Image: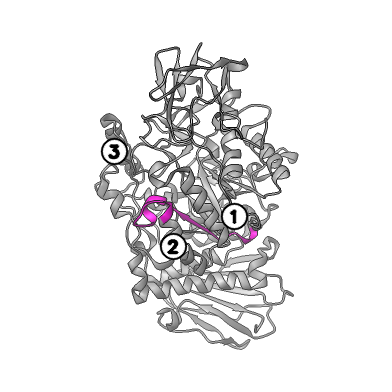
Amino acid sequence: MQVNERNIGLNFNLNQDAVVKVWAPLAEKVALQVEGREPILLQKDCYGYFSLITNGISAGERYWFLLDDDKQLPDPTSLAQPDGVHGASMAINLHYDWTDSSWLNPPLNDYLIYELHVGTFSTESDFSGIERHLDHLVDLGITAIELMPLGSFPGNRNWGYDGVFPYAVQHSYGGPKGLQQLVDACHKRGLAVILDVVYNHLGPEGNYLSEYGPYFTDKYHTPWGKAVNFDDQDCDGVREFVIENVLMWFRDFHIDALRLDAVHAIKDFSAVHVLQEIRQQTDRLMELTGRRHYLIAESDLNDPRYITSVAQQGMGMDAQWVDEFHHALRVSAGEARKGYYLDFNGLPDLAKSYRDAYVYTGNYSLERRRKFGKDASTHPAQQFIVFSQNHDQIGNRLLGERSSTLYSYEMQKLLAAAVLFSPYIPMLFMGEEWGETNPFYYFVSHTDKGLIEMVREGRKQEFAAMHAAGEAIDPQAEDTFNASRLNWDLLTDPNHQVLYQFYKKLISLRKSNSVLAANDRSAVKAQVLGSQQVLVLTRGLQNDTGQVICLMNFSEQPQQVSYPTGKTTDLYLMVDSASPQWHGPQASPEIWKQTQGITLQSASFVAYSTSHD
């Protein structure tokens, strides 16, 4: 496999001839059908591929593939679907005059991620709207933005996980050229770009892949039906389809990292797992270009094999999301123990997650009714991404409530600090930095009436499983989408502006403090103080300059805390969420004397350092 250029689909060479290659093992004949012209027959090659080099199509023209003279279908590797998922594909020349030749993707340890949904992030609902707010993200201290999936989906409203054209950037967002321009603008401002991609399933409407070949197999069951065919008969073409997609984002769009959705739902018993092959081909590309790219997994298996190198028989992912940190944190903050929160005991589990990343490392799970997970304590902190909210954890609530409507102002600050002072890579969800109050619902814009009813009914069943009482919001309604849009005007409100400044302060401290920036997992201690609902997180070793002691009071009452044992010097205040500066009730002392205790205000976070810097 060549990694230096796109090898499948319709591409243009230096002579502006179209180089066409399509995998269609179920067809005997394949022709290129350019709108308004006679079909051009492709040559049948080995292993189900058909190919053609022609000057019979130019960039910007619409085309179809004609299978066996009677099936007119869009290109499965289409780069643009301007007329929607049922319409013709558009020929695109991916050449772009990049200005980011000096850009260096920062080390993962320096990532501070901001997840956003293109459609609801701005009033424009497209890439230009994101670009307009990039200076806000830089001012906040963000170092990487994460875009929810961009593959073309039905209509203009979707989370992106119903995409059916993995190569085609959603047209309403700005298409492929709009994405290239956004990435270039991000790199100019020092921001890395992560793209969320979905290789475990495709959406139901506009999914024409099965007309071309056995892209799916009934060997395995997934929540979305048949599994993507990574190890059954004729799977080689499917694997190339996915791996080429990975390489395209890195090579042709200069994406810095991919977040691979629900890798636990990728079923593959091949000798070389498709994730391992993705890792290997990504490494080949990096050797060729000199650019650095990361692979980030979403997995609910608590299996460190996913973040273990291929050389050590792992899957080779650089990092993974840790939902269990979120679950333990939310239960600590008062979330009811039902649904998937049933397995979490609040502060003891949060302390374990600070130490071990995973909460379940072989212990018994009530929800799963079995022992679950494996220890990952030997893996470095930068392999774990933590958060207090994300698209899933908000949008999969009955009313799409953000933390701002579930918790007090003081608790919101505590949640922010719990994430940003952790040893792991922190991630924020768009708008949380100012306490956005608009919900973030699940939304779609399908055209199939039967499918719309299935989605509505499916959401009701999901909420029933979570024991959520009330009427589910209609995901198809345009009002559902509009209600989920960020309200940037809230930044002018004093309370929301102070919260924003508090986030800025925490992020600045995380970057500037040597102990917090180092993210040394071996120098992390976390303990719960009896029944006080207070967690003490210590960052740095005893003899470190500037060891940081974080006190988190999750209770509804002030708590008295004694001077830490083993300390022989005064401690100096770094940040106090209860300070009037942050609209809190009362500040802690600037210097914590050895002979004194301090009073932690309810729902508050205080950090002290052994250094006076």
Element at label 1: loop
Q: Marks 3 and 1, how far apart in space?
A: 45 Å
Q: Quadrant of the C terminus?
A: bottom right
Q: Who is closer to the viewer here, 101 or 473? A: 101
Q: Is residue 550 magenta?
A: no
* Label 2 crowd (10 A; few <14 / some 14-19 / many >=20): few
Check disc 1 and report the residue beneath it.
99
Residue ID for mark 3:
456
Look at the numbered discs 3 and 2 and tell me whether their residues touch, using CB distance below 8 Å: no
Q: Mark 1 Cα within 10 Å, few/some/many (few <14, many 20+)?
A: few
Position of residue 172 measured from the top left corner of the image (x, y, whole percent) = 37, 44
Residue 93 position, x and y percent, is 52, 38
Mark number, residue 133? 2
Helix, strand or loop at mark 3 = helix
- Start-end of magenta stretch: 109-128
**Which sits in the foreground, 227 or 528?**
227
Among the two numbered marks 2 and 1 on one chain, the one whose residue lies closer to the N terminus: 1
Left or right of 335, for residue 185: right
Q: Is residue 223 visible?
A: no
Q: What percent of the width, then of the height, locates residue 194?
A: 54, 50
Identify residue type, mark 1. Thr
Say if 168 sits above or below 97 in the image: above
Q: How is the image coloured?
A: one colour
